[in-house]
Amino acid sequence: MTAHAIELKGISKAFGPVQANRNISMSVAKGTIHGIVGENGAGKSTLMSILYGFYKADRGEIWIDGKLTPIPDSQAAIRAGIGMVHQHFKLVENFTVVENVILGAEDGALLRPSIAKARRLLTELSEEYGLKVDPDAMIEDLSVGHQQRVEILKQLYRHADILILDEPTGVLTPAEADQLFRILERLKEEGKTIILITHKLREIMEITDTVSVMRRGEMTNTVKTADTSPAELAEMMVGRKVLLEVDKAPATPGDVVLKVDKLRVVRGGVERLKGVSLEIRRGEILGIAGVAGNGQTELLQVLGGMIPAQGGTVTLHNEPLDVTGKHSNGQTRRARGIGHVPEDRQTEGLIMAYEAWENVAFGYHQDPKYNTGLLMNNAAIKDDCADKMARYDVRPPNPRLPARNFSGGNQQKIVVAREMDRAPDLLLVGQPTRGVDIGAIEFIHKQIIALRDQGKAILLVSVELDEIMGLSDRIAVMFDGRIMGERLPSETNENELGLLMAGVTQGAA
Amino acid sequence: MDKMPKWADVVLIPLISVVLALVVSGLVVAIIGESPWRAMEIMVRGAFGSAYGWGYTLYYATNFIFTGLAVAVAFHARLFNIGGEGQAALGGLGVAIILLGVAWPHWTIALLAAVLFSAAFGAVWAAVPAYLQAKRGSHIVITTIMFNYIASALMVYLLVNVFRVEGSMSPESATFAEAVHLPNAASFAGFLGFRGSTPLNFSFFLALLACVFVWLLIWRTRLGYEIRAFGHSDSAAVYAGINPTKIIMITMIISGALAGMMAINVVMGEAERLVLDFVEGAGFVGIAVALMGRSHPVGVILAALLFGALYQGGAELQFEMPAISREMVVVIQALVILFTGALDNMVRMPMQAFFLSLRRRREAGARTPAE
């Protein structure tokens, strides 16, 4: 039996009162792909940060290739042959591929010889592992999938034998994700060891050899992938049985609620929406699928009044909605009966420093029921908050707790309670379950479907294809600021949507 | 869960900072060969030992309450208003214009007019940097500093060329009419021993009123809610439909108005004429006061009182101990500002760690021995 590539023994780490990692032991055999799954806040990222030297463990040992190897900083991690590909790439946009690869690993004071050497090495590496990238291309001109390859190349250039990938497929189309997996398999054949952190159980099943499950800072199970199933993994992650499928009756669409016609948005000199047209009816969920950054964010922001549009028209119940002018803001939208669960609850949907009750009024703070004359009626807001917390199962149900002290799922429930409880005619929902634990996902999905069944119109934006497929009554795919096509969930599949998400159209359907 | 109890945050940490500042000040005093104990005693007695001392301490505190509130209000919108100095100077200009220009029958109406004019002048002086920040993205720290210089030059020009009394050599305006004389502490609190010479005047109550106003504004009104929301997260504010331009403008206008009203205390209440440089750094002390008072009106009052005492006690100190020069007193004041404002985290971090370890020990103790 060969030595393990990585062996962790009794790793513990606390941040203040929070025990992020508790006595974690794990070993990964050389030349295998090991998956780590767990809900948000289960401690996966902390554990990997300890392995990569960002944090120092309070207790425990790290063994690399059978040798005790302390990793006080990331320099030590690199020396030990560990490379990390972050979820958000650490690349300099206006540097070429070669320049990015040698950044921080230059040989001497002069750049030219280093670059020449790097270009040669890069070509070799590209061929060896099937990582085709043009060494002289600018990063900003590369697709997200190719940028990720540069990140991997960067690690290989630094002689990494152990690669850690943190949520690598979050920004990729299904096709790009497939290519990534082929690359990972190739790396494995060449003897590299790979640790894959993800919350997508499908990917775990597809690519890993072994998988570890983390829950509440502890490593609860490590199993051979071949011996387990997605349902079993989900159960291990949450600690109880979970419904992975969404349960809903067929839609009965009514009158048109929202009609968007040739909407155009330019942000920072770039055209983000290039003439988007769509319709949503009463009692219907329209899902927008697409890889992040193809205009979905801007679509939600324009409809929610956060940014102005440069052209196009929008009507709500056949009445025009000002999307280009002065009166286009969040207040006027709410007055027209539009609710908005924004994509990013931490920087948009909530004021993290505000207590829960203050957040329950956020955006609706002009509402007469929250005010008495000049002053705000704090008692009324607190009562309303306590009531909403009880009905939307927010834990702990304490209106005086600052938003930042709730878990991701409970933060999202506060936003959902605020935006959905008024039963808006149109609900805009962005990434409703991003960073939300599986239990809360179930709950939020049920709420969205309940609102639809009340005859409301819902626009759902999500980068999770499973979520779009499960919830939507119709699916529109966005690519590069345009709607590439519409499909019915019953008549399409992930391959077809994946092609549309990559901008490929095969004749009109 | 919070890292430490609230009382530690608002009371204990500033207290430790002040004590540290005094210890270092004491060392400095000892180095030049004087007794730190005696210096300390002179300062405390000078500030609080007599009605005379209290009169000056509270008079200075009145200035610092206004400028401290000005900085605090801006802080809530995460705007750093360094321009209190210039805004207060302009406030003085407003006071002088309205008191010299109109023959007021009684000080009460004159005070109302002075409040309006000082606030308006200070507000206008703050509104220009605010507009540049909101519409052009020019950083408000830079522009408000620049506006201090402009204000200073403007005041010199006006006092020398416009307001100076004919035949006079000093750059100051004519004295205001007797009718607009504000009651001083001797007239409304003579029973406490205040004499006619005390500078403490009716403006003190105006400052307390301003504290109530700021508390209501920030924590009880929709505008205050929006100001705080914008200060915490501008992207979330936009999501909620809060207009950033509006918030920046209104917040800075209120901030400038509060700074401007400081002039009522000095120009109308004490000097009774417009003099050069009457602000005397109160605009900058306001930053330390707001920091130390954690941008809360009650904290601002306490911090203003501390700095008022430092000013008054410091003046007594250089009078009674010739070895301690004016500059020495400034060093002591600067040390307090340094420790309470700039070095806040130096005390805060160990205190947080201390309270955390306390809590862990308590929790460990509460658990069963099996753990």
Image: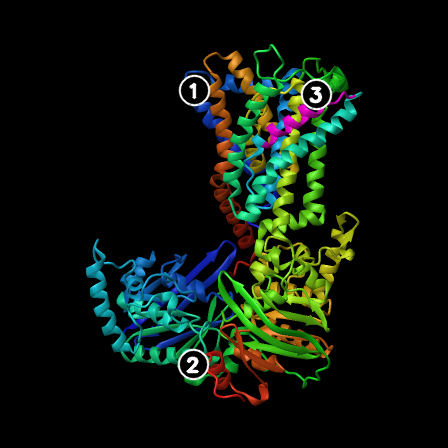
Q: Which residue is mark 1?
A: B30
Whether the residues at callouts 3 and 1 have beta carbons within 8 Å, the answer is no
x and y percent of residue B7 in the render? 61, 41
Whether the residues at callouts 1 and 2 have beta carbons within 8 Å, the answer is no
- Sequence-wise, which precedes: disc 3 or disc 1? 1
x and y percent of residue A370 in the render? 76, 55
Main secondary-structure element of the magenta-colored stretch: helix
Image check: B140 left or right of A223? right
Secondary structure type for disc 1: helix
Q: Amino acid at mark 3?
A: Leu
Q: Which numbered dot is residue A175?
A: 2
Does A422 appear in magenta?
A: no
Q: Residue at x 73, y 55 (%)?
A: A366
* Chain letter belonging to callout 1: B
Q: Amino acid at mark 1?
A: Ala
User: In the picture, which quadrant includes the C terminus of chain A?
Assistant: bottom right
Q: CA distance from mark 3 to mark 2?
A: 80 Å
Reply above or below: A266 against B149: below
Secondary structure type for disc 2: helix
Q: Residue at x 71, y 27 (%)?
A: B114
